[in-house]
Image: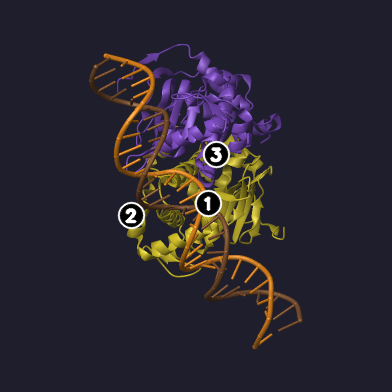
Chain colours: A yellow, B purple, C brown, D orange
Amino acid sequence: MGHDREKAMTSHSEPLSLFLKRLLLRSELDEAEQQAILGLRAHLQEVPAGADIVIPGDCVEYSCLVATGLIGRFEVMSDGQRQIVSLYLSGDMCDLQSVVLPVAGWGLEAISASTVLKVPHADLRRLAADFPSLAMAFWRDTAVDACILAKSATIVRRKDAMCRLAHLICEMTLRSEMVGITREKIAIFEASQARLADILGLTPVHVNRTLADLRKAGAIEGAGRSFAIADWNTLVSIAEFDPIYLVTGTPEERLLDRAG
Amino acid sequence: MGHDREKAMTSHSEPLSLFLKRLLLRSELDEAEQQAILGLRAHLQEVPAGADIVIPGDCVEYSCLVATGLIGRFEVMSDGQRQIVSLYLSGDMCDLQSVVLPVAGWGLEAISASTVLKVPHADLRRLAADFPSLAMAFWRDTAVDACILAKSATIVRRKDAMCRLAHLICEMTLRSEMVGITREKIAIFEASQARLADILGLTPVHVNRTLADLRKAGAIEGAGRSFAIADWNTLVSIAEFDPIYLVTGTPEERLLDRAG
DNA sequence: CGTAGCTTTGATTGTTTTCAACACATGTGG
DNA sequence: CCACATGTGTTGAAAACAATCAAAGCTACG
């Protein structure tokens, strides 16, 4: 593994505040709880595109907070084929569930060149034990992940390739914008077609044809390696995209943690 | 809804102890925590096969503990078609994640005639706040659910109908045995082919043909409405079934909650 | 009986995979 | 600079898989 270039940094404030921002989207946290998140210690690691961060079967002792780039959680079939089941971008704590299930049946890989903060499980567990609201926030974060997974599981069973691909683009665009990434820099547009195939559960050949179909429909534009959104409304209508499952949440819901 | 026949019962010890048993499979709980679970108050409800318990979009204030029967969590497509994404059997707290995400984008329906205990979210939240280990146990339970979902999402994308159906039978058989249900009484065997289609993301017609193929292969037996396992090993090999994702867990892992 | 729901079977259509080949860019060593 | 390998994108043809449409048989139940 040539990419184990780790640095023990003292200031990780930027990615940690992105993570805090993400938690605050769906959970209400007081000053002490917010400071506890921002005070987490972590190791910064740079990961080149395509590299594995966690191998299936590893027992991990940390979660990975994505600072920049795009990380995928994948499962490996008996024939060695990969299926990427979840995607994580800046501010996402990928594999937060590994805090409660440290023996992973899955792996983590970098879809594009990324930097991640490795946050020790022990620290996250202590936070969850000391601050019940943080325990709820972590649990909620895992649940939102599961909602996204359920959505993609539904679509993959019932919709054709064009709808699936359009839906993926819509979801990643919206999620990127939620953390302040501009539409031009959305990581999914830089993934190879083979990687898109791993995500969508299609063959690379069919991803290629489907991209061509989306271009023909006027939803996306740009030839070759990269593409961009040409018409958001067309894309949304092809995808039948309804963002409700991303659970941006309302203040009333967030207050429930403290209602007891 | 003719099935709103609720009874406020004083003793729900049996299903609650099944739920506790399920939690103890993966989490270490002390005497006080165990008593807290067993002391939960709840309303018993009987639900006929096919009835909806939660409609998508409802804001629910309780989780449903399955006492007997089989419950499915489903999403509805734009064309009204249902996709069942998770299955819950005796001892499972279905929709435990709704404690942290009360506005459901999904629904719950009874696959077979069932009895459920409605447990108020407020009580579960109080338990999570009072006992950090219970908060971790609930979180872990949600994470295991997500693992099962990830597994089925992987298989549905990469394997054909025969493998998927065999895998479903294997999984439900094993999960049933984990809570002490005998192989003859496994609920999935009583589901209609239309229901199996909703679960697997296939058409009822194709489920029928695939069941016939499994019979031909000698994996299952019995004509018409119901079937049974004829040869477990054949079934496992068709399904390429590896139960590791069910996370039965080891004692060492369970101790981590208290390591802090 | 007769109906309603479920199962079974057949024929046809559509989507996706598979296999195969070629184009195109990038990077390397000669 | 060229030859060459490698990875990625593109295109075509054939085959596999599942959906769709249609019809008939079976069961349970009133």
The secondary element bearing badge 3 is classed as: helix
Q: Earlier in the sequence, mark 2 or mark 1?
A: 1
From what the image shows, is residue A92 above or below residue A194? above
The kind of secondary structure element at disc 1 is strand
Amino acid, disc 2: Ser
Identified by mark 3, the residue type is Cys
Where does label 2 land, which residue? A237
Question: B175 or A65: nearer the eye?
Answer: B175
Q: CA distance from mark 2 to mark 1?
A: 23 Å
Q: What residue sits 49% from the left and 25% below the top?
A: B189
Q: Amino acid at mark 1?
A: Leu
**Considering the numbered disc 2 on the image, is that residue within a helix, a strand or a loop?**
helix
- In the orientation shown, which residue stands out farthest toward the top? B10
Pointers 3 and 2 in contact (CB under 8 A)?
no
**Disc 2 residue crowd, few under 14, some 14–19, many 20+, Cα 10 Å:** some
Residue B163 is tagged as 3
Label 1 crowd bin: few (<14), some (14–19), many (20+), radius 10 Å: many
Name the one closer to the observer, B190 or B122: B190
Chain letter of disc 1 in the image: A
**Residue at (41% x, 26% y) in the render:** B110
Q: Residues within 10 Å of mark 3 (few under 14, many from 20)?
A: many
Q: Is residue B138 visible?
A: no
Image quadrant where one finds the N terminus of chain A: bottom right
Task: Chain letter for mark 2, please.
Answer: A
Both labels 3 and 2 in a single chain = no
- CA separation in Å, label 3 and label 1: 26 Å
Identified at 38% across, 30% down, the residue is B60
Q: Closer to the camera, A158 or A130?
A: A158
Residue picked out by circle 1? A87
Task: Report, in whole angstroms, how far the alpha carbon at label 3 lies from the one at label 2.
Answer: 33 Å
